[in-house]
Image (spheres, rainbow, N blue to C red):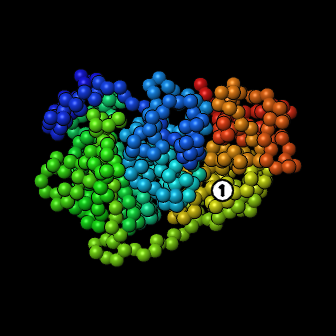
């Protein structure tokens, strides 16, 4: 692989690393590493380890992160279809971990697609609080939505917007923000050879120009006292320490939360203020940022900085209580569903004509135990219903791809539950369910979209008086994977074509 590295890149690294360069270069001849992160919103780590036959080794810096063996294919396993884990490069687990999200936080993932870190942040929220996931590229947002749905996340709002347009509605709004910026990708050359071929010497400067803007925009959306994590998967100081030093000089009310080289994160090397050009007043503070070196730990090259807003701006008083925002709709319970009020922005259009609320209410009464979305606000876009997390500001003029958990749609006055609804439920949320073991041949048949033979007494009916005929939540090892419809000994298959086992 060493031979495939661009010459200008090798020279730049030599100038940076000096005596460490041979070890750095040698890392390109080592095996690449494979990681997955357990989705602790769905399954606790210990329960997953007891269930899974994969041979896993912990990633030291991510509490739910594991290395798996080359040759294993966790992406081709029913547990993957159940959203029990996300396949993620081990170093890429660091930034979201460092942000230290707590249940109930309001979190923004500004450059979120395809959603590796979004799903990690969501696991930390444990269904409480709000997660806004944004990406500017429409195609990449599709993958983001799919990963959010696969992970069963209920409290995420997906936006496809230029961050400039988010600054107004979300000014000072978030407790935690992740800015996982587009970057020159130098840390990924071992994993993705194509990136090394595409790299150009002017990329660090070009990406730095974008990153500068993104960091400034993100900071405006952070609450006083909040925390922001900035990350790249590149080595150039222009995109890393220089970005942070420049930001600190311009924003004296921010400070670095030291992580690089700390006792807690022993694998992370300190940032390198000594690589900065002269002229930054607070450049020395970047020693507290973190560099993840492929020759010093088991992962690819990354950089992460954690920045804390000190709580006051320019010596003023800290903002006491958070500002009250105009909520778009009232919280609803499934059986009390009623339309979102008009003027709710593009996220909450008026309800469709054919009494969809009644259809949703009927579905909920027949299929669901009370509560899976009772704390949220039900909003409608045409015939589509979403459970929107509370405390969302008005989003007029913002491209909202998902205003919340997609529940389903109304067709011919009947409510058709979405795949996202199935994935976000617990098995116990459904009044009618069936669970197959991962190794049961019917599992893969179901995931391939086939109709299954299923006796009525194989169904789990949670309440007396519920008939076996109707929607059934299909589970693998007790974890939902999708819907089926049971009638007369057959389970018709509603597993979506785009998700099927191939
Ligand atoms: C490093 S990737 C993000 C990876 C993602 N955080 C994950 O863990 O899966 C950077 C992302 O930034 C997005 N992006 C580029 N420019 C952007 C901008 N101005 N605003 C928001 N997102 C942007 C790209 O589309 C890309 O998906």
Q: Quadrant of the C terminus?
A: top right
Label 1 environment density (alpha carbons within 10 Å; few <14, some 14–19, many ≥20): many
Farthest-out residue, bottom: 317
Q: Does residue 8 lie above or below 325 as drawn? A: above
Quick check: 38 left or right of 330?
A: left
Q: Is residue 36 left or right of residue 467?
A: left
Image coordinates for residue 49, horizontal then vertical, percent:
55, 37
Classify the position of the N terminus by image quarter.
Answer: top left
Is residue 398 visible in the rendered image? The answer is no
**Which residue does the numbered mark 1 point to in the structure image?**
373
Q: Residue 99 at what x, y percent from top left?
A: 40, 54
Which residue occupies the foreground of this view, 392 or 248? 248
Percent position (x, y) of residue 225? 38, 66
Q: Residue at left 49%, top 60%?
A: 105
Q: Nearer the viewer, residue 43 or 60?
A: 60
**Residue situated furthest left in the rendering:** 278
């Amino acid at each position: 692989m060493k031979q495939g590295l661009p010459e200008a890149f090798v020279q730049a690294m030599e100038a940076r690393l000096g005596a460490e360069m041979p070890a750095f270069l040698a890392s390109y001849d080592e095996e690449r590493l494979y990681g997955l992160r357990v989705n602790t919103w769905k399954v606790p780590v210990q329960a997953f380890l007891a269930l899974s036959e994969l041979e896993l080794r912990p990633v030291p810096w991510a509490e739910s992160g594991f290395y798996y063996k080359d040759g294993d294919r966790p992406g081709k396993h029913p547990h993957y279809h159940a959203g029990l884990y996300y396949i993620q490069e081990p170093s890429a687990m660091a930034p979201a971990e460092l942000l230290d999200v707590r249940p109930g936080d309001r979190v923004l993932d500004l450059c979120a697609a395809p959603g590796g870190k979004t799903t990690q942040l969501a696991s930390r929220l444990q269904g409480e609080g709000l997660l806004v996931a944004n990406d500017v590229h429409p195609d990449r947002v599709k993958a983001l939505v799919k990963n959010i749905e696969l992970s069963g996340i209920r409290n995420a709002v997906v936006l496809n917007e230029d961050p400039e347009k988010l600054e107004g509605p979300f000014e000072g709004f978030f407790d935690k923000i992740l800015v996982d910026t587009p970057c020159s990708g130098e840390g990924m050359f071992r994993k993705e050879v194509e990136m090394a071929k595409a790299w150009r010497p002017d990329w660090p400067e070009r990406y730095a120009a974008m990153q500068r803007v993104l960091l400034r925009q993100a900071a405006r959306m952070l609450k006083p006292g909040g925390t922001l994590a900035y990350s790249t998967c590149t080595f150039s100081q222009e995109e890393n320490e220089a970005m942070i030093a420049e930001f600190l000089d311009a924003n004296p009310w921010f400070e670095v939360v030291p992580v690089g080289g700390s006792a807690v994160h022993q694998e992370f090397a300190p940032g390198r203020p000594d690589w900065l050009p002269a002229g930054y007043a607070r450049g020395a503070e970047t020693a507290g940022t973190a560099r993840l070196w492929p020759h010093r730990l088991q992962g690819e090259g990354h950089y992460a900085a954690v920045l804390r807003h000190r709580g006051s701006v320019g010596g003023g008083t800290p903002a006491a209580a958070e500002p009250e925002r105009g909520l778009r709709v009232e919280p609803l319970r499934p059986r009390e569903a009623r339309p979102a009020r008009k003027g709710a922005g593009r996220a909450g259009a008026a309800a469709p004509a054919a009494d969809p609320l009644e259809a949703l209410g009927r579905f909920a009464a027949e299929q669901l135990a009370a509560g899976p979305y009772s704390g949220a606000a039900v909003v409608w876009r045409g015939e589509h219903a979403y459970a929107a997390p509370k405390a969302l500001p008005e989003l007029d003029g913002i491209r909202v791809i998902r205003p919340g958990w997609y529940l389903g749609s109304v067709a011919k006055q009947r409510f058709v539950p979405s795949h996202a609804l199935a994935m976000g439920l617990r098995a116990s949320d459904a009044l009618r369910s069936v669970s197959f073991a991962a190794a049961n041949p019917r599992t893969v048949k179901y995931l391939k979209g086939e109709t299954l033979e299923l006796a009525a007494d194989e169904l789990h009916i949670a309440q007396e008086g519920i008939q076996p005929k109707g929607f059934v939540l299909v589970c693998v090892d007790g974890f939902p994977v999708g819907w089926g419809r049971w009638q007369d000994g057959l389970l018709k298959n509603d597993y979506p074509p785009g998700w099927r086992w191939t």
